[in-house]
Image: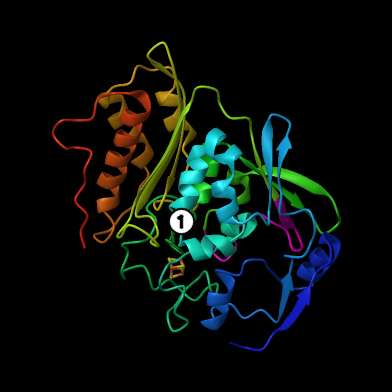
């Protein structure tokens, strides 16, 4: 690890000033320290925000909740307001990482964690995300964990967060504080950039702008929430495919559906057209197949990750069957073969 300066920020103003001057914000450090040890990231200054008061609370925000950026993933998943009102979020958190990591990882840090593309973690490999213009060793390489939606010729990395997938299904927003002291709220679609030609630019946060909280809207009364994650082993593995769903039924019809997907997108993936085509309809296998076809219409795969098409399709169908009470398929069509 290269030498670096360490600064403990006493308030957001100090932290923002230091970040604007090039300092790298650190909280739980569960991703950043790994990247520094591998010399994938070599910040000259770390700005520790863990002692800034007031950011580690879960508070009421009108009918919803305000989750401070420093709330630990383990505390968030155990909070009774989350477990009862937002079970999709609790389940996504528990499906992510190990217990030890959840004890350290923070809400803000979870949102800003970097991709787990193996080429990104190897400084000997070309990577546009690590070094703009260097090329992308993943193209033509091992693509099993790469994204199939929202990618570009410059980068095909998948976003790694489970929590962010649940937050997209819940239509959560992020609250930030800019370096000039102004605050703003933005949805996760506005927070995350697609890679385009600059995959090193992952969010729309400005220099010195800090995530201070996640804002959850009021829970949707009567809605079923679920999170399903398919991965190579039962714990401590990133998603091949995951689905977060918030579905409300009314008179045997799908009144509203909000789906989000992990493991397949360059950012936590949501397609409003999929939600729209499900909402107001009677649940049926045909409807769910059409929704999956719509979701995957723009997917780009290669030999190494083409299995994600079928896996995503079956995961969507299985989650929607469960949420709407439609009987599971008797022929096992909700299962998918996963190539090793
Ligand atoms: Fe880097 Fe993205 Fe290519 Fe992976 S897919 S090597 S992160 S540019």
**Residue 204 is one of the magenta-drawn residues:** yes
- Residue 316 drawn above or below residue 238: above
Taking the image as shown, residue 315 lies to the left or right of residue 92, namely left
Q: Quadrant of the N terminus?
A: bottom right
Going 43% across and 51% down the picture, which residue do you hit? 265
Q: Is residue 160 visible?
A: yes
Numbered label tally = 1
Image coordinates of residue 270 in percent, x first then y, are 48, 40
Residue 192 visible? The answer is no
Q: Main secondary structure of the magenta part?
A: loop
Q: Residue at x 23, y 38 (%)?
A: 334
Residue 53: image x %, image y %? 80, 58
Which span is picked out in magenta? 196-212
Q: Report whether 19 appears left or right of 193.
A: right
Compared across the picture, whether 31 is left or right of 50 comes to: left
The C terminus - image quarter: bottom left
- Ligand 1: image quarter: bottom left
In which quarter of the view is residue 74 placed? bottom right
Residue 47 in the image, given as x and y percentages of width and height: 74, 72
């Amino acid at each position: 690890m290269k030498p670096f300066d360490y600064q403990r920020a006493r308030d957001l103003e100090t932290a923002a000033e230091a970040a604007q001057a090039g300092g790298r914000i650190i909280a739980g450090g569960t991703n950043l320290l790994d990247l520094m040890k591998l010399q994938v990231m070599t910040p000259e200054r770390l700005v520790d925000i863990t002692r800034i008061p007031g950011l580690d609370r879960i508070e009421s925000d009108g009918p919803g909740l305000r989750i401070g950026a420093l709330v630990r993933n383990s505390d968030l998943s155990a909070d009774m307001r989350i477990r009862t009102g937002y079970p999709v979020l609790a389940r996504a958190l528990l499906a992510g990482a190990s217990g030890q990591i959840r004890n350290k990882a923070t809400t803000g840090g979870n949102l800003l964690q970097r991709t787990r593309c193996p080429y990104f973690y190897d400084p000997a490999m070309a990577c546009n995300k690590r070094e703009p213009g260097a090329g992308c060793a993943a193209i033509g390489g091992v693509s099993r964990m790469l994204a199939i939606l929202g990618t570009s010729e410059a980068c095909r990395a998948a976003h790694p967060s489970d929590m962010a997938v649940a937050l997209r299904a819940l239509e959560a927003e992020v609250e930030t504080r800019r370096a000039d002291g102004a605050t703003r709220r933005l949805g996760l679609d506005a927070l995350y950039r697609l890679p385009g030609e600059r995959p090193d630019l992952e969010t729309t946060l400005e220099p010195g702008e800090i995530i201070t909280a996640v804002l959850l809207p009021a829970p949707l009364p009567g809605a079923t929430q679920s999170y399903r994650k398919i991965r190579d082993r039962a714990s401590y593995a990133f998603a091949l495919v995951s689905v977060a769903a918030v579905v409300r039924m009314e008179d045997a019809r799908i009144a509203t559906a909000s789906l989000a997907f992990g493991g397949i997108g360059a950012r936590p993936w949501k397609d409003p057209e999929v939600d729209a085509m499900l909402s107001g309809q009677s649940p049926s296998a045909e409807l769910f197949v059409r929704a999956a076809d719509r979701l995957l219409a723009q997917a780009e795969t290669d030999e190494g990750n083409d299995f994600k098409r079928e896996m995503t399709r079956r995961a969507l169908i299985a989650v929607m069957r469960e949420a709407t009470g439609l009987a599971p398929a008797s022929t096992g069509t909700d299962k998918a073969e996963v190539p090793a």
